[in-house]
Image (cartoon, rainbow, N blue to C red):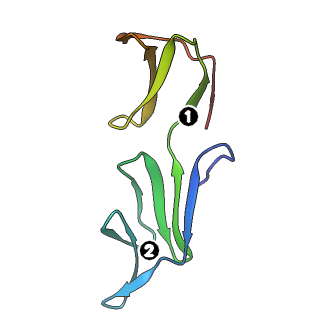
Amino acid sequence: MMCVSSQTYVSWPHPTFHSQGEEMCEHSEVRHSIGNKWISEDCMECRCRRDGLHCCSTYATPTNFPSDCVAELDKKNCKYVVHKKDDPKILCPIFGSVG
């Protein structure tokens, strides 16, 4: 996994534990074997490694869009949607983002 510096990155050093002789990580009450990779419910790409659990965001965060619009993270599709504040059906342009 490679996270860009502007992406959200979370690392828990040495969260591994042994279960019946196997090293594992636990994330959101689910156990993962060393080497496993998954997308979490909050759209983070996570990997269980020997040195710990590492996660980074899978989406770009809008930083520049019209002031009458709002950005909302669509967790089903793991991407931001920018729409009019008073009408979510009308999408807005995104002029800049990070991640």
Vertical comparison of 63 with 28: above or below: above
What is the x, y in percent for residue 79?
44, 32
Disc 2 element: loop
Q: Which residue is mark 1?
A: 60
Q: Is residue 43 left or right of residue 19?
A: right
Residue 68 against residue 2 in the figure, above or below: above
Q: Position of residue 83 (x, y in %)?
A: 44, 15
Label 1 secondary element = loop
Pair 1/2: label in front: 1
Viewport quadrant of the C terminus = top right
Judge left or right: residue 81 versus residue 50: left
Residue type for callout 1: Ala
Q: Quadrant of residue 65?
A: top right
Q: Residues within 10 Å of mark 2 (few under 14, many from 20)?
A: some
Distance of mark 1 from mark 2, alpha carbons? Answer: 27 Å
Residue at left 50%, top 43%?
Answer: 58
Q: Which residue shows up at 54% across the image and 12% down it?
A: 93
The residue positioned 34% from the left and 62% from the top of the image is: 28
Which residue does the numbered mark 2 point to in the structure image?
Answer: 34
Task: Find out whether the residues at labels 1 and 2 contact each other: C-beta distance under 8 Å.
Answer: no
Q: Position of residue 6 (x, y in %)?
A: 67, 43
Q: As rendered, which of 75 and 32 lies closer to the eye?
A: 75
Q: What residue do we see at 45% from left, 69% from top?
A: 35
